[in-house]
Every structure is written in C-alpha cells, then in structure tokens.
Image (cartoon, rainbow, N blue to C red):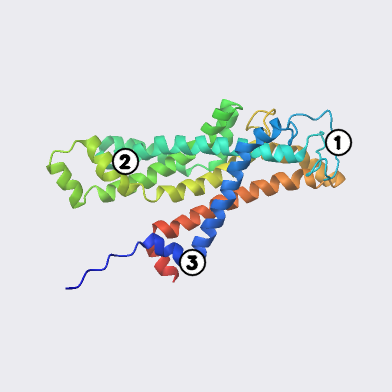
C-alpha cells in the first residue's frame, strides 16, 4: 500500500528557490519596513534629543554643508535637512495609508455590488468611474486639492479619488466573470442572500489582484503627494514634506550649488517609491503563478 504524497506548498517552494522577482520583493519589503520604522521612531528620537525639531530654523546656520552636527546639512531657510527628511517619511506614509484605505473601502464594495447586481446601478457607476478614470490623474488631484485646500485629509481625498475608480473597475470586471460560475449558482439555489454571496463566495475570488494594485498605487500616491507639495497644494507649510522642501530649495540649487538640501529629500522619495514598486512587482509573481511559468 502506497501513501499518497502531499502536494508541496507552492509559496514555500517559491521562497526555497527564489527567482529574481522574489528577491526583489524581499528587497522592497526591507526598504518599505525601514521607512515605516523611521516614521514611527522619528518623534521618539526627537524626544531623546537625537533629532532636531524639523520646524526649528532660527538656531541653525543657513546653507551649512553636511557635517557631524548636521548630517544632511542645513537648508537655505536654516532647517536641519536630516530631521526634515526623516519627518517627511511620516507625512508621506500617513497620507498614503489613508488614501489606500479610503480607496479600498469605497472602490472594492462598489465594484462587487455593481458587477453582481448589474442593471441601471452598474451603468451609472460605470459611467461615473469611467469619467474619473479617463481624466489625467495628476490634473484631477491638483484640481481637487485647489478646491478643498491644504490639509492631511484634504490631500487624502485629492489623492484617493482616482484610485477609487481603478479599484472599482478591476473588482467589477472580476465580479462579472465570477458571478456566473457554478459555485455561485449553487449558493443562489440554496437560498444564500446577496450580502452572503458577496462576502462569503465572491470576495476572496475577486480580491486576489488588489494587493498588487495597492502597492503600485501607494508608490504612485507618494509621487502625487510630492507633486502637490511641489506646487504648494499639499500639506500645510508647517508639516515637513518632501515635495515642499524640493520646491523651496530648487532655486538655491541652480544659483548657489547647495545640492544637499534637494538631494536627500529627493533620494528618500525615490527610494520609498522604488521599494513599494518592487513589492508590487514581486507580488505579481507570488499571486499569479502563470506569469512565473512564462518568465521561466
């Protein structure tokens, strides 16, 4: 009598023999976790006296190059660039976190209900989201930020509105293709209510591609927030933010050659976007085995 072998876990095999995409996924996770730790520990380090107040400029010499007293130098306004860069991580992750939460909470349920029920509701929602989706994303965010003004939640609204349409379209298309499957028809025949079908049978089947979209949208949201800050439409001026700092120091870079006040915020912005993008690309291979086979 032979004992049937248990099938190996594909995900475990994936990490035992990692491909390039999985290695990049790990790098992206490490980079992103590093920024999360910075955002959480920056106020603690300031309380211990290891970081200067990012809003304190009067006690510093202006345009001082990097040194032991100011690791990233000082800006043209006398701010400590090291402190501003670290606290800028806090502002970026805060807006991105709430923007992705709002997009998920609104876009995913709308997509499931619209795709499952169809009819006039589906046509109206599809028209509205298609209208939003066809507009240039950055232009839409700039327009909304100009209307609602500065502030954390205002920036969240301006950034997340275009992502709601994206989540809606993806989830709605998956729902329309899955709702005709036999297991859905069986659940309906057994008398399952619409909320039960949506939550128990449809949700896990249509949500699989959302984590990939989420990480890629998070990277894009950071760029959008920095663009708003660069244009003076993002967070309040009292909040350390990479886009705003780049805007203020860019003129000094071309005239006086003070490279450090723009390099370090720009490098932090680029590194965080790269980390989130690597997570999204790596998740594509983990979640979608077909793409992994095609790569090989």
Secondary element type, mark 3? loop
Cα separation between marks 1 and 3: 48 Å
Disc 3 versus disc 2: nearer the observer: 3
Q: Is residue 231 visible?
A: no
Image height check: is 284 above or below 92?
A: below
Disc 3 designates what residue? Answer: 19
Which sits earlier in the primary sequence, circle 1 or circle 3?
Answer: 3
Res 74 label: none
- Residue 146: image location, x then y, percent: 60, 29
- Residue 6: image location, x then y, percent: 27, 65
For disc 1, the neighbor class at 10 Å (few under 14, some 14 to 19, many from 20) is: some
- Residue 225: image location, x then y, percent: 60, 39
Which residue is pictured at 47% across the width and 41% down the height? Answer: 163
Quarter holding residue 240: top right
Disc 2 designates what residue? Answer: 112
- Front residue of this view, candidates 126 and 29: 29
Image height check: is 194 above or below 273?
A: above
């Amino acid at each position: 009598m032979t004992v049937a072998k248990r099938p190996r876990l594909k995900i475990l095999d994936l990490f035992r023999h990692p491909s390039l995409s999985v290695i990049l996924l790990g790098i992206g996770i490490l980079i992103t976790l590093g920024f999360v730790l910075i955002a959480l520990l920056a106020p603690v380090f300031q309380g211990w006296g290891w970081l200067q107040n990012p809003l304190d400029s009067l006690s510093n010499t202006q345009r001082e190059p990097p040194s032991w007293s100011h690791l990233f130098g000082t800006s043209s306004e006398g701010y400590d660039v090291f402190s501003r860069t670290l606290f800028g991580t806090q502002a970026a992750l805060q807006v991105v976190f709430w923007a992705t939460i709002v997009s998920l909470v609104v876009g995913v349920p709308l997509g499931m209900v619209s795709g499952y029920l169809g009819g006039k509701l589906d046509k109206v929602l599809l028209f509205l989201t298609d209208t939003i989706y066809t507009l240039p994303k950055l232009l839409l965010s700039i327009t909304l930020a100009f209307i609602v003004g500065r502030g954390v939640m205002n920036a969240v609204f301006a950034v997340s509105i275009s992502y709601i349409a994206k989540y809606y379209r993806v989830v709605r298309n998956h729902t329309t293709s899955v709702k005709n499957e036999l297991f859905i028809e069986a659940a309906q025949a057994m008398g399952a209510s619409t909320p039960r079908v949506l939550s128990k049978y449809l949700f896990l089947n249509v949500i699989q591609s959302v984590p990939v979209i989420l990480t890629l949208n998070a990277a894009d949201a950071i760029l959008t927030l920095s663009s708003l800050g660069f244009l003076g439409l993002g967070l309040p001026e009292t909040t350390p933010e990479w886009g705003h700092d780049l805007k203020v120091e860019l003129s000094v870079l071309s005239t006086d050659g003070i490279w450090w006040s723009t390099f370090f915020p720009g490098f932090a912005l680029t590194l965080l976007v790269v980390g989130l993008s690597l997570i999204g690309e790596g998740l594509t291979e983990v979640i979608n085995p077909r793409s992994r086979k095609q790569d090989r």
